[in-house]
Image (tube, rainbow, N blue to C red):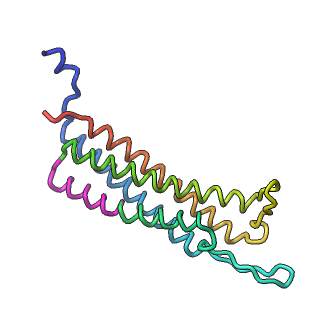
Amino acid sequence: MESMEAKLPQNPPRKTHKLVLCAQICLRIVAISTAFAATWTIVNAKETVVVFGLQFEARYTYSSAFKFFAFANAIACGFTSLSLIFVLLIFRHGRFTPSNFFFLFLHDLFMMSLILSGVAAGTAIGFVGRYGNNHAGWSEICDRLKKYCDKVTASLVLSYLSVICLVVLTVISAGKSRQIMV
């Protein structure tokens, strides 16, 4: 029996809990900020050009992939803000239980998956917009809509940063949810 108890991870000191929660708070604030900035940038990305006397306008609402990207970031920003409040309550009341971290793990996993799917869709359409697809007969548009494409690219980069923060949060929460409280 003693050898089995020695193999189980012991409860880390309270200082370690506070360090992990401070890291979670900082990473959540960065994830919220980058998701919000990505949403704001894609929603405000629009440009109008005149080609051969015809006026063309580019907006995120003209692409279902960019709409999904914008809404995925907005939803993740909102729910991650709620999880920040949950983490602050854990920190304030000192409830460092594995079940609390398991709920955070599930939340972070879902939000990371949501943002990752949105940014993947946005990247695919952005790639076609920047480089075109000769086999399908789609020409690139970024040579004419430089400002619009630059804003979309910035929004995608911000969203990838949010994904990285959520991946780290998922790993931290998964590790903390596996600890046995003694």
- The residue positioned 81% from the left and 60% from the top of the image is 137
Q: In this view, does 96 lie above or below 143?
A: above
- The residue positioned 86% from the left and 81% from the top of the image is 52
Q: Is the magenta stretch mostly helix, strand or loop?
A: helix
- The residue positioned 64% from the left and 55% from the top of the image is 124
- The residue positioned 76% from the left and 79% from the top of the image is 49
User: Where does the C terminus fall, quadrant-wise?
Assistant: top left
Residue 180 in the image, given as x and y percentages of width and height: 19, 33
Q: In this view, does 118 lie above or below 167?
A: below
User: Where does the N terminus fall, quadrant-wise?
Assistant: top left
Q: Which region of the structure is painted magenta? A: 80-95
In the figure, is residue 9 to the left or right of 58?
A: left
In the figure, is residue 39 to the left or right of 149?
A: left
Q: In terms of image quadrants, where is residue 176?
A: top left
Q: Is residue 74 above or below residue 108?
A: below
Outermost residue, front direction?
Answer: 136
Is residue 85 in the magenta section? yes
Residue 169 in the image, given as x and y percentages of width and height: 38, 47
Number of marks in the rendered image: 0
Residue 18 in the image, given as x and y percentages of width and height: 24, 46
Q: In terms of image quadrants, where is residue 4?
A: top left
Residue 8 in the image, given as x and y percentages of width and height: 21, 25
> Is 19 or 109 nearer to us in this picture?
109
